[in-house]
Amino acid sequence: MHIISKNEEDTFNAGVMLAKRLSPGAVVALYGDLGAGKTVFVRGLAKGLGLKARVSSPTFTIVNEYSGDTPLFHFDMYRLNGSDELFEIGWEDYLLRGGICAVEWSENVDDAFYDDTIRVRINKLSDNERSIDIDMGEVQGQ
C-alpha cells in the first residue's frame, strides 16, 4: 500500500487506517529518518486501537506501554546497538502479551522480525509531504 501524506494529519490518519486492519500480536516495524513522522503514525495507531493515552516517543525509556482492549507497546530502537539488546529488554515477552508492537528505528533490530511483520517506510518528500509505504508481510497479505 502506498500513501502520499500532505501533512501530519494525513500521516496520523494512515496510522488510524492501519490499526483497523491489525490483529492482536501484530508487529509494526517503522523505518524513516529523524522527523519523518514515525511517532505521528504511532499516535494514529493508538487512536485507531481506541486508546486515549497521550503517545510520545520512547527514545529514553525504550518502550512505552498503553493499556486498552488491545494494548500498544511502542518501542524506540534508536539507542540500541542491535537485536541482542532488544531481546535483553524482554522482546519475546512483549510478543506473547497479545498487544500491538510498534517499533521505531526498526533498521537497528531488523533481524529480530518475522516474515509476518508489517513494515512501514516513511520518507520525506518535502517539509510537509511524506511517502508512506506499508508492506503487510507474508502472512497478513496485502
Image: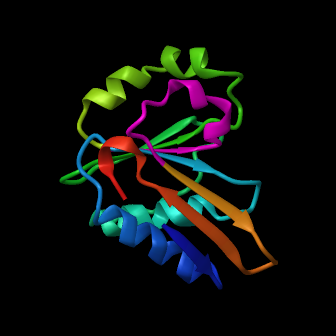
Q: Is residue 85 above or below residue 22?
A: above
When the figure is inspected, residue 76 is found, relative to residue 20, above or below; the finding is above
Q: Which residue is nearer to you in this view: 64 or 28?
A: 28
Query: Residue 1 at x, y = what percent?
Result: 48, 67
Q: Residue at x 33, y 22 (%)?
A: 93
In this rendering, is residue 57 above or below 15?
A: above
The reply to whether the magenta stretch includes residue 112 is yes
Q: Residue furthest bottom?
A: 6
In the rendered view of the protein, which quadrant contains the C terminus? bottom left
- The quarter of the picture where residue 80 lies is top right
Q: Residue at x 33, y 44 (%)?
A: 26
Residue at the (74%, 62%) spot, across then down: 35
| Residue 13, image x, y percentages | 46, 77
**Is residue 68 or residue 132 the one in the foreground?**
132
Q: Give how far across and how far down residue 17 sits, in percent.
A: 37, 72
What segment carries the magenta color?
100-118
Q: Is residue 97 left or right of residue 84?
A: left
Residue 60 seen in the figure:
no
Colouring mode (rainbow / by chain / secondary structure / one colour): rainbow
Horizontal and vertical percent position of residue 100: 34, 46
To which quarter of the image does residue 90 belong? top left
Is-magenta flag for residue 121?
Answer: no
Taking 68 as reference, is 96 above or below it?
Answer: above
Q: Visible in this render: residue 44?
A: yes
Quick one: which residue is furthest to the right in this view? 126
Residue displayed at 45% across by 67% down: 15
Tally of numbered discs: 0
